Amino acid sequence: MTRAGNEPWPNGSFVQQLPDADRIALLDAGTLLRFEDDQILVVQGDAGDYLYVLTSGLVKVIVGAVSGAQTTLAIRSRGDLVGEFALLDDKPRMATAQAAGPVSALKIGGAAFLAVAGRSPEAQAAVTRYLLAKMRDATERWSAERIWDARERIAQVLYELGKQHAQPDADGLIRIPITQSELGELAGVAVSTAERVLKELRKQGVVSTRYREITIRDMAYLDGIRFPREKP
């Protein structure tokens, strides 16, 4: 049993990678907070003397430009960290984190987190692996924008969200609280293109959509788009 709910921590999440003793120390160091839909956890440009460990829900990572335009760069979920970069490099926060639906998170002060992160070689390695995984994901997405077509990129993002950031309902469907516009931003395609691809996937029964929600009905089909079997 976890100390922040009865569900197991998702594979690959930061909390899941920690040894048991370090995981317990991390969770004991935090104060549990709850956020409503659209509520802000951290703000781009602010100082970062604390971070969050997500215990439930999804959080959008959003970067704002000087022009005022905003882009959704990533989605974080249970077991992930939010706000760790500013804490680790002592620079202003690179992005804003906003709740996508109800969210629960443990708020942990910088000194407390660094104490846990440095208490064992295994904990230090977990921090390194987690940060490198984020860098790898960003690099792979950048590469995909130059190699894959829009349909493959949309399928990739949906598959990642379905596998890493959501749990199937009793009916086997995976419901993700994001808009079609946000999906397009994550995939690096125009909103009109994302809408067109989703329309095709709806006709094929792969997904369904409603206000601020995309439901995945066929993960295997999305996986096939990402890696077509006929390609070398």
Image (cartoon, grey):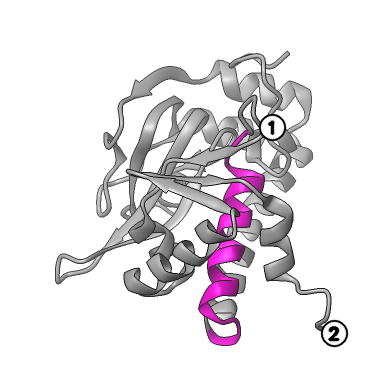
Front residue of this view, candidates 63 and 92? 63
> Can you give x and y, in whole percent of width and height, for residue 227 in the image?
75, 71
Query: Which one is closest to the eye, mark 2 or mark 1?
Result: 2
The reply, left or right, for residue 164 in relation to residue 61 is right
Query: Which residue occupies the foreground of this view, 150 or 57?
Result: 150
Task: Give the mark nearest the N terminus, 2 or 1.
Answer: 1
Quarter of the rendering containing residue 181: bottom left
SS class of the residue under badge 2? loop
- From which residue to which does the magenta span run? 146-167
The main secondary structure of the magenta stretch is helix
- Residue for point 25% across, 54% down: 45
Coordinates of residue 143 in the picture (x, y in percent)? 59, 80
Number of numbered markers: 2
The structure residue drawn at horizontal position 58% and vertical position 31%, both measured from the top left corner, is 115
Quadrant location of the C terminus in the rendered image: bottom right
Q: Nearer the viewer, residue 86 or 44?
A: 44
Q: Residues within 10 Å of mark 2 (few under 14, many from 20)?
A: few
Q: Position of residue 1 (x, y in %)?
A: 73, 13
Circle 2 residue: 232
Between residues 221 and 44, which one lies in front from this camera angle? 221
Where is residue 200? Give x, y as percent. Answer: 51, 66
Query: What's the amino acid at mark 2?
Result: Pro
Left or right relative to 143: residue 18: right
What amino acid is labelled 1 in the image?
Arg
Residue identified by numbered label 1: 119
